[in-house]
Image (cartoon, helix red, strand yellow):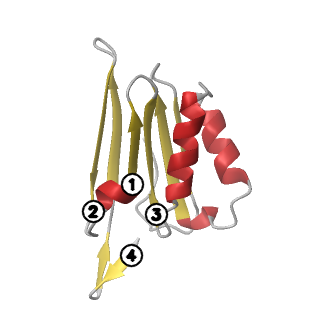
Amino acid sequence: METIVGETAVTFSVLMRVPETETLVAAAATGNLGVGGWVLRSAVGYGLVATQGYSVSPIWGDQALAGLFREEAAQELVSKLTKDDLGRDLRQLSVLDAKGGVGAFTGASNTAYMGQY
Protein backbone atom coordinates (compact mmCIF):
# COMPACT_ATOMS: atom_id res chain seq x y z
CA MET A 1 0.00 0.00 0.00
CA GLU A 2 1.12 3.51 -0.71
CA THR A 3 -0.23 6.85 0.42
CA ILE A 4 -0.96 9.26 -2.41
CA VAL A 5 -2.01 12.83 -1.55
CA GLY A 6 -3.54 11.78 1.75
CA GLU A 7 -5.40 8.84 0.23
CA THR A 8 -4.55 5.17 0.49
CA ALA A 9 -3.85 3.46 -2.83
CA VAL A 10 -5.09 -0.12 -2.84
CA THR A 11 -4.03 -2.76 -5.36
CA PHE A 12 -6.17 -5.74 -6.31
CA SER A 13 -4.81 -8.58 -8.45
CA VAL A 14 -6.56 -11.55 -10.01
CA LEU A 15 -4.81 -14.63 -11.41
CA MET A 16 -7.08 -17.16 -13.12
CA ARG A 17 -6.89 -20.35 -15.16
CA VAL A 18 -9.78 -21.51 -17.39
CA PRO A 19 -9.64 -25.33 -17.10
CA GLU A 20 -11.52 -26.04 -20.33
CA THR A 21 -9.05 -24.10 -22.48
CA GLU A 22 -6.03 -23.92 -20.12
CA THR A 23 -6.07 -20.16 -20.72
CA LEU A 24 -4.30 -18.05 -18.08
CA VAL A 25 -5.64 -14.58 -17.29
CA ALA A 26 -4.22 -11.84 -15.05
CA ALA A 27 -5.54 -8.41 -14.10
CA ALA A 28 -4.53 -5.73 -11.63
CA ALA A 29 -6.12 -2.47 -10.57
CA THR A 30 -4.58 0.17 -8.35
CA GLY A 31 -4.57 3.80 -7.32
CA ASN A 32 -0.87 3.97 -8.16
CA LEU A 33 0.61 4.63 -11.60
CA GLY A 34 2.61 1.90 -13.30
CA VAL A 35 0.84 -1.16 -11.91
CA GLY A 36 1.61 -3.09 -15.08
CA GLY A 37 5.34 -2.73 -14.60
CA TRP A 38 5.41 -3.69 -10.92
CA VAL A 39 2.67 -6.16 -10.11
CA LEU A 40 2.14 -8.76 -12.86
CA ARG A 41 4.52 -11.23 -14.52
CA SER A 42 3.53 -13.91 -17.04
CA ALA A 43 4.93 -16.52 -19.40
CA VAL A 44 2.81 -18.42 -21.92
CA GLY A 45 2.77 -22.10 -21.02
CA TYR A 46 4.33 -21.57 -17.58
CA GLY A 47 2.15 -19.38 -15.38
CA LEU A 48 1.34 -16.05 -13.76
CA VAL A 49 2.75 -14.07 -10.84
CA ALA A 50 1.46 -11.06 -8.88
CA THR A 51 3.46 -9.21 -6.24
CA GLN A 52 2.09 -6.26 -4.30
CA GLY A 53 1.64 -4.89 -0.77
CA TYR A 54 3.04 -1.95 1.18
CA SER A 55 6.49 -2.66 -0.28
CA VAL A 56 6.26 -4.35 -3.70
CA SER A 57 9.11 -6.70 -4.59
CA PRO A 58 9.55 -6.92 -8.37
CA ILE A 59 12.45 -9.27 -7.54
CA TRP A 60 9.92 -11.76 -6.13
CA GLY A 61 7.99 -11.54 -9.40
CA ASP A 62 11.07 -12.17 -11.53
CA GLN A 63 12.33 -14.99 -9.31
CA ALA A 64 8.91 -16.67 -9.21
CA LEU A 65 8.69 -16.53 -13.00
CA ALA A 66 12.16 -18.09 -13.26
CA GLY A 67 10.98 -20.87 -10.92
CA LEU A 68 7.96 -21.50 -13.15
CA PHE A 69 10.35 -21.91 -16.09
CA ARG A 70 12.08 -24.61 -14.01
CA GLU A 71 8.61 -26.16 -13.43
CA GLU A 72 8.74 -25.66 -9.65
CA ALA A 73 5.39 -25.98 -7.86
CA ALA A 74 3.62 -22.69 -7.16
CA GLN A 75 3.34 -23.06 -3.36
CA GLU A 76 6.95 -24.24 -3.06
CA LEU A 77 8.08 -21.15 -4.97
CA VAL A 78 6.10 -18.86 -2.70
CA SER A 79 7.46 -20.54 0.43
CA LYS A 80 11.04 -20.38 -0.83
CA LEU A 81 10.88 -16.73 -1.91
CA THR A 82 9.14 -15.40 1.20
CA LYS A 83 11.07 -17.40 3.83
CA ASP A 84 14.22 -15.30 4.17
CA ASP A 85 13.06 -11.89 2.94
CA LEU A 86 13.29 -9.41 5.81
CA GLY A 87 10.60 -7.26 4.13
CA ARG A 88 8.10 -10.11 3.75
CA ASP A 89 5.68 -8.67 6.32
CA LEU A 90 5.13 -5.72 3.95
CA ARG A 91 4.59 -7.79 0.80
CA GLN A 92 2.17 -10.08 -0.98
CA LEU A 93 2.94 -12.77 -3.57
CA SER A 94 0.62 -14.98 -5.63
CA VAL A 95 1.68 -17.63 -8.16
CA LEU A 96 -0.50 -19.65 -10.54
CA ASP A 97 1.23 -22.33 -12.60
CA ALA A 98 0.07 -23.56 -16.01
CA LYS A 99 -1.47 -26.72 -14.49
CA GLY A 100 -3.59 -24.73 -12.02
CA GLY A 101 -1.34 -25.06 -8.97
CA VAL A 102 -1.48 -22.03 -6.70
CA GLY A 103 0.63 -20.46 -3.99
CA ALA A 104 0.02 -17.26 -2.07
CA PHE A 105 1.51 -15.27 0.78
CA THR A 106 0.31 -12.10 2.53
CA GLY A 107 2.62 -10.39 5.00
CA ALA A 108 1.15 -9.49 8.39
CA SER A 109 1.82 -5.74 8.07
CA ASN A 110 -0.44 -5.14 5.08
CA THR A 111 -3.84 -3.43 5.39
CA ALA A 112 -6.78 -4.78 7.33
CA TYR A 113 -8.38 -5.91 4.06
CA MET A 114 -5.82 -8.38 2.78
CA GLY A 115 -5.48 -11.99 1.83
CA GLN A 116 -5.93 -14.46 -0.94
CA TYR A 117 -8.90 -16.55 -1.98
What is the quadrant of residue 30 in the picture? bottom left
In space, the residues marked 2 and 1 are separated at their CA atoms by: 10 Å
Bin the neighbour count of mark 2 within 10 Å (Cα to Cα): few under 14, some 14-19, many 20 and up.
Answer: some
Q: Secondary structure at mark 4?
A: strand
Q: Counting other residues with Cα less than 10 Å from the Cα at mark 1, is it few (<14), some (14-19), or many (20 or more)?
A: many
Q: Nearer the viewer, mark 2 or mark 1?
A: 1
Of residue 112 and residue 51, the one placed in the foreground of this image is: 51
Is residue 84 shown left or right of residue 68?
Answer: right
C-alpha distance separating marks 4 and 2: 10 Å
**Which disc, if any, is residue 13?**
none
Can you say whether 28 is above or below 68 in the image?
Answer: below
Q: Secondary structure at mark 1?
A: loop
- Spatial CA distance of label 3 from label 2 is 11 Å
Tag 2: residue type?
Thr
Residue 32, horizontal then vertical, whole percent: 28, 70
Question: Which amino acid, mark 3?
Answer: Gly
- Residue located beneath label 3 in the image: 53
Callout 2 touching callout 1 (CB < 8 Å): yes
Q: Label 4: which residue?
A: 2
| x and y percentages locating residue 64 in the rendered image | 56, 42
- Separation of marks 1 and 3 at Cα, in angstroms: 9 Å
Compared across the picture, whether 63 is left or right of 5 comes to right
In this rendering, which labeled residue sits more in front, label 1 or label 3? Answer: 1
- Label of residue 39 in the image: 1
Tell me what residue is drawn at x 58 percent, y 46 percent.
63
Q: CA distance from mark 3 to mark 4?
A: 8 Å
Which residue is denoted by mark 2 in the rendering?
A: 30
